[in-house]
Amino acid sequence: MSFAPRLGLAVLALAAAVDPVAGAPALPAAVEALQHGYVEAWDRADPAAIAAFFARDGDFTNPTGFHAQGRADIAAFYGQAFAAGYAGSRGGLKLLRTRMVAPGVMVVDGEWSIRGAHTPKGAERPGEQGLATAVLVRTGHTWRIAALREQEAPAD
């Protein structure tokens, strides 16, 4: 499995921010709770907990084109990424846009970054950054990731 994990957690953190439109209300507390839980799972390098934030049939594609479908595949991907030196790394993010496209469906765009990852032999990896777009869906009071697409951007 080819991977470069990038920052799936960025999208959820972006979803918790206030909509940039003047006077727009904050997003639901459930989305903010999802963001905090996802970041905590990343910080613990817990692939099963990360996968639980996706819809059962949720999917993602990373910047290398690797695609994972469903929670088991997503957990396996992150498990390999953490074992390959991403455990202990820190992510950053900047909100670009959020948009409710239908009741219970939100599109989130943002910039992500990863610092502090290491190669399997322990050497520090260069920082990574890029753009991410996610579709979040609400079921009851719970928001989940239905689709996550990430792309890499050149380093500053």
Image: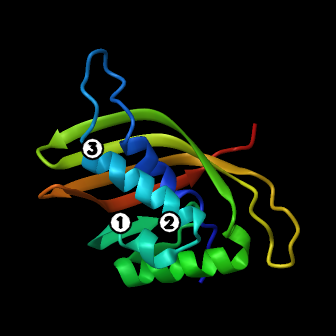
Residue that label 3 marks? 29
Give the total of numbered labels. Answer: 3
Q: Residue drawn 55% across and 53% down?
A: 151
Q: Residue drawn 30% across and 48% down?
A: 31
Element carrying mark 2: helix
Question: Are the two marked residues, 1 and 2, in contact with CB atoms closer than 8 angstroms?
Answer: yes
Element carrying mark 3: helix
Query: How far across and down, in percent of the image, does residue 101 sit?
Result: 19, 41
Left or right, 18 with respect to 36, comes to left
Residue that label 2 marks? 41
Camera-side residue of 96 and 18: 18
Element carrying mark 1: loop
Left or right, 121 with respect to 38, comes to right
Q: CA distance from mark 2 to mark 3?
A: 18 Å
Query: How far across and down, in percent of the image, does residue 126 sit?
Result: 80, 55
Residue that label 1 marks? 53
Amino acid carrying mark 1 in the image: Phe
- Label 2 neighbourhood size at 10 Å, few (<14), some (14-19), many (20+)? some
Query: Residue 78: which quarter of the image?
Result: bottom right
Q: Residue furthest top?
A: 22
Above or below for 25 versus 117:
above
Q: Is residue 2 visible?
A: no
Q: CA distance from mark 1 to mark 2?
A: 10 Å
Q: Residue drawn 50% across and 50% down?
A: 10
- Label 1 neighbourhood size at 10 Å, few (<14), some (14-19), many (20+)? many
Q: Residue drawn 34% across and 51% down?
A: 33
Amino acid carrying mark 2 in the image: Ala
